[in-house]
Amino acid sequence: MKLKAHLNKESTAGVIFTLPFILGFLLFMVVPMGISLYYSFCDYNILSPPKFVGLKNHLAVLTDETFYKAIGVTFYYALVSVPLRLIFALLVAMILLKSTKATGFYRAAYYLPSIIGGSVAVSILWKRMFAMDGVVNSLLSLFGIHSELSWLGDTRTAIWVLILLAVWQFGSSMLIFLSSLKQIPVTLYEAARVDGAGKLRQFKDITLPLLTPTIFFNLVMQMINGFLAFTQSYIITQGRPMNSTLFYTVYMYQQSFEFYNTGYGAMLAWIMLAIVGIITLVLFATKKFWVYEGGF
């Protein structure tokens, strides 16, 4: 009877229902992270047992030029692609705010790239589109621009191909912006129009301030995703040419599973965790200076 009464408690039911998630989190997140932390202090190549070497991996990174190159490329990719993605997402969300019979179709169509954009198939498609004999150069030739530019073979344009793919995947941010736009009271715009405010003034004084919490949320999430991007670089360019598209995650993968320097790769993973954590802390620390929290 006591066991039955205990099982009928709300707290017990909560523990039972959350137990699969807790076990999964421990087994597939916490335990692997602990093992990775240990490997970061080891000389380990998968083929032989790990050998503890202390801070050898951490000191080696100080003279690793490719490490600094990968860091620079990743920062450039994230700091350029994320703002562009958010701008396009907000622009499209404002266009779709007005409901029509085809609004549902357009929302689904714009959201679709966010679902399939990170897939291997889309990356291969993108690679073919920007090949010398691909769709992009063919379209340019139709407009009289006889381009034989190797988009993926030029250090000036290769990274922009990946940035363009990232910007194309603005659907998730768009839906979040669209939801927030619908929460803004129409009476605010009506009062602004009575006072003679135009569309630009309404956007500046009403829409933008009230959207800053949503912009902040999208910025944090998309910035994290930007630093963790992998598929685009690995499938489309493999970091070439001359490491101009070498994302940090790709370099980490290469060290771990192609060069069999798994201990060094584990150390790189923890550095990335620290970088993402610091960036997130900076964003939250500066939140009060640019996020409007006054409500409606």
Image: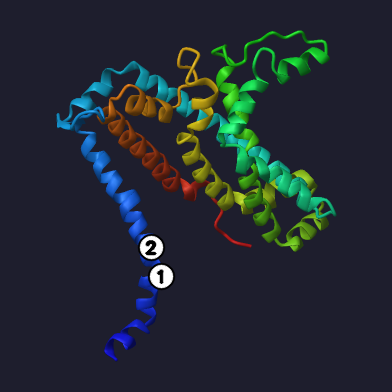
In which quarter of the view is residue 72 placed?
top left
Colour pattern: rainbow
Left of 41 or right of it: where is 151?
right
Image side of residue 105 versus residue 6, left or right: right
- Measured from the top left, where is residue 74 in percent x and y? 46, 28
- Tell me the element at label 1: helix
Question: Which amino acid does the dot numbered 1 rest on?
Answer: Phe
Left or right? Give the position of 90 relative to 256: right
User: For the point 27% across and 17% down, which residue is it?
Assistant: 63
The residue closer to the viewer here, 222 or 16, is 16
Asked whether disc 2 touches disc 1, contact meaning CB atoms under 8 Å apart, the reply is: yes
Mark 1 neighbour density, 10 Å: few (under 14) some (14–19) many (20 or more): few
- Identify the residue shown where x is 27% and y is 23%: 61
Above-or-below relation of 63 to 184: above
Quarter containing the C terminus: bottom right
- Classed neighbour count for the residue bearing mark 2: other residues with Cα under 10 Å, few (<14), some (14–19), many (≥20): few
Question: Toward which corner of the image does residue 250 lie, by quadrant?
Answer: top left
Q: Which residue is mark 2?
A: 20
Residue 292 image point, x, y percent: 56, 53
The residue that appears at 31% across and 55% down in the rendered structure is 26
Disc 2 to disc 1, how far (Cα)?
7 Å
